[in-house]
Amino acid sequence: MTRHYLLVDDNQAFAENLAEILEAHGALVDVALDASAAMRRLETTRYDALVTDMRMPGLSGAELVHLARQGDPGLPVVLLSAYAQDAQLVDARRDGLLAVMSKPGKVPQLVALLERARRGGIVLLVEDDVALAENLGEALAARGLTVCTASSVREVDAMAVQPFVALVDLRLPDGATGESLERVRERFPDTPTVVITGLADATVPAGSELFKKPFDTVALVDRLEQLFARTGPA
């Protein structure tokens, strides 16, 4: 099946060139030059993935991701940014990104990433270890899965996503041990939960699974693949 992407960038020459490359790989590509035009397209078309620049006139790429999530929660998103430390990246990651890629980036990597992208493959990752979160994010993206990250209990409360699974560290800096899991189960009662923890004596309630740190990342991602297969694409 031909994949259909929406590409958003205020640099028309860049956008059209990238669109031609993606089309040469068999995709259909619509181009929007700002977030407002992108939202109009998103209201009428169900895309396989959204690729957006971060810094644009009017709404930013991060703001576009937030709005797009409200209408299409399962949409995979790749954010392009020339500014690796852009403060809005934190907000965008909370809303869920398949990947953040530098601009200009390596087009073959982008093409491969988009071909793997899975609608509805949203993983909620509740983890305050930045390095671990980034490594897991890369491993999940390699399987086409999107990660929404929360590093505190407060951020879990602010989540407005629809994950098919939640990965939860039991100990976060702003809550008692286990409070993060309780909050996730309250916010997403129908979502399977997988606890990832370094606590030697950790136990989990019925309905949750346990992976103790340091865990086998491949085994964890394989298990998430199994859980995703039960839900199907969104």
Image (cartoon, rainbow, N blue to C red):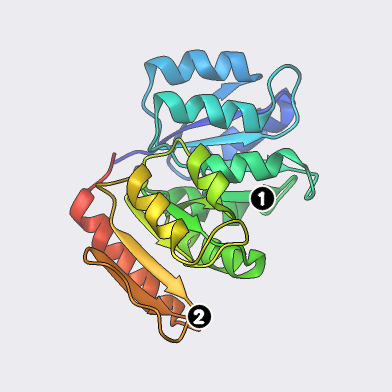
Around disc 1, counting alpha carbons within 10 Å, would you say few (fewer than 14), some (14 to 19), or many (20 or more)?
many
Residue on which the image places disc 2: 198
Residue at 80% from the left image edge and 45% from the top image edge: 83
Residue 112 located left or right of residue 164: right
Residue 52 at what x, y percent from top left?
62, 34
Going by the numbered disc 2, the residue's amino acid type is Gly
Q: Nearer the viewer, residue 29 or 132?
A: 132
Q: Nearer the viewer, residue 62 or 175?
A: 175
- Numbered circles on residues, count: 2
Q: Secondary structure at mark 2?
A: loop
Residue 159 visible within the image: yes
Residue 190 at what x, y percent from top left?
24, 47
Going by the numbered disc 1, the residue's amino acid type is Met
- Identify the image quadrant of the C terminus: top left
Residue on which the image places disc 1: 101
Residue 40 at what x, y percent from top left?
49, 13
What distance separates the C-alpha of mark 2 from that of mark 1? 31 Å
Q: Nearer the viewer, residue 97 or 191?
A: 191
Give the mark, 2 or 1, whose residue is nearer the N terminus.
1
Q: Is residue 97 above or below residue 167?
A: above
**Given this view, does label 2 or label 1 mark the residue nearer the observer?**
2
